[in-house]
């Protein structure tokens, strides 16, 4: 056993037997192990000029990187089809042995927890299919994968996308605004109020959307203009 100390550059001199002896080396700093290097063989590139160096790299000599699939005991993939509302879970065990793989889908909402599917397969590889019922709607489903009774994977899927009215909303907005305006043709003020109510109702019904720089801001400015016009019309009547 030899305990050489390194200099400020991390270099030291050790007395080793070339080629014939296998060494285990431990690097310590203030009592803490920085790295362990096993099965090291001393070898000189050029004995004449003294080119005998051993480079110790802790990144290549430490423990093997954590294998996520190995820890789960499965190689796996999720695939959800929003059109058919089918969730497929494909798997194969890392060691080739048969395991009980269970897929449970749970919908969580204000009414509590509802199990929407519960399927299992005992095999070394295969596919489990979970059909999300239409009655579930577009809620978020929590998918749990159990391997031999132990929870291994938790995933979240959207059962479907919320209805998007898209361009049809602008037509509905135009129709609503025009209808309300024509219903209040008895005065200019009533027409302006009808237009404003139409825009407000279109926003509430999600016919239109947008932020500060989008179509939503245009509606806000139209409402403000309508209020100004009503104010000016009333002022003219008073004069």
Image (cartoon, rainbow, N blue to C red):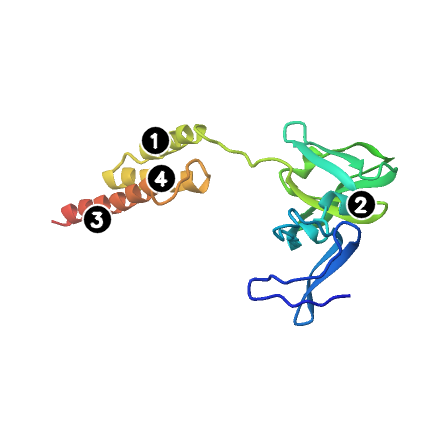
Number of marks in the rendered image: 4
Q: Which of marks 3 and 2 is in front?
A: 2
Residue 129 in the image: x percent, y percent? Answer: 76, 32
State the residue at coordinates (59%, 62%).
10
Residue 23 vertical position relative to residue 170 in the rendered view, above or below: below
Furthest residue toward bottom: 30
Q: Give the camera-side residue of 170 and 10.
A: 10
Check contact, mark 4 vs mark 3: CB within 8 A.
no
**Real-space CA distance between mark 3 and mark 1, rounded to the nearest whole angstrom:** 22 Å
Residue 84 in the image: x percent, y percent? Answer: 67, 27
Q: Name the residue under label 3.
A: 231
Give the class, few, some or many, for how many residues have Cα within 10 Å of label 2's Cα (few <14, many ≥20). Answer: some
- Label of residue 214 in the image: 4
Say left or right for 79 vs 101: left
Q: Nearer the viewer, mark 2 or mark 1?
A: 2
Q: Is residue 141 visible?
A: no
Residue 120 in the image: x percent, y percent? Answer: 83, 38
Q: Can residue 227 be seen in this view?
A: yes
Q: Name the residue under label 2.
A: 146
Q: Give the camera-side residue of 126 and 24.
A: 24
Say left or right for 19 vs 50: right
**Real-space CA distance between mark 1 and mark 4, rounded to the nearest whole angstrom:** 22 Å
State the residue at coordinates (67%, 33%).
80
Q: Name the residue under label 1.
A: 178
């Amino acid at each position: 056993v030899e305990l050489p100390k390194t200099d400020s550059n991390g270099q030291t001199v050790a007395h080793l037997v070339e080629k014939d002896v296998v060494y285990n080396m431990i690097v310590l700093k203030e009592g803490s192990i920085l790295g362990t290097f096993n099965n090291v063989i001393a070898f000189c590139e050029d004995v004449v000029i003294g080119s005998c160096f051993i480079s110790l790299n802790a990144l290549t000599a430490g423990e093997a990187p954590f294998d996520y699939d190995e820890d789960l005991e499965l190689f796996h993939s999720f695939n959800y089809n929003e059109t058919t509302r089918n969730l497929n879970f494909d798997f194969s065990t890392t060691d080739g042995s048969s395991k009980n793989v269970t897929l449970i889908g749970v919908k969580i909402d204000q009414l509590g927890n509802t199990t929407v599917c519960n399927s299992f397969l005992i095999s070394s590889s295969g596919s489990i299919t979970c059909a999300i019922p239409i009655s579930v709607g577009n809620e978020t489903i929590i998918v749990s994968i159990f391997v031999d009774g132990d929870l291994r994977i938790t995933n979240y899927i959207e059962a479907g996308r919320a209805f998007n009215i898209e361009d049809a909303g602008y037509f509905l907005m135009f129709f609503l605004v025009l209808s309300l305006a024509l219903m209040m043709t008895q005065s200019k003020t009533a027409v302006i109020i009808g237009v404003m109510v139409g825009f407000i109702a279109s926003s509430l019904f999600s016919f239109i959307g947008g932020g500060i720089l989008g179509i939503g801001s245009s509606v806000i400015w139209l409402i403000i203009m309508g209020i100004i016009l009503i104010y000016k019309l009333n002022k003219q009547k008073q004069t």
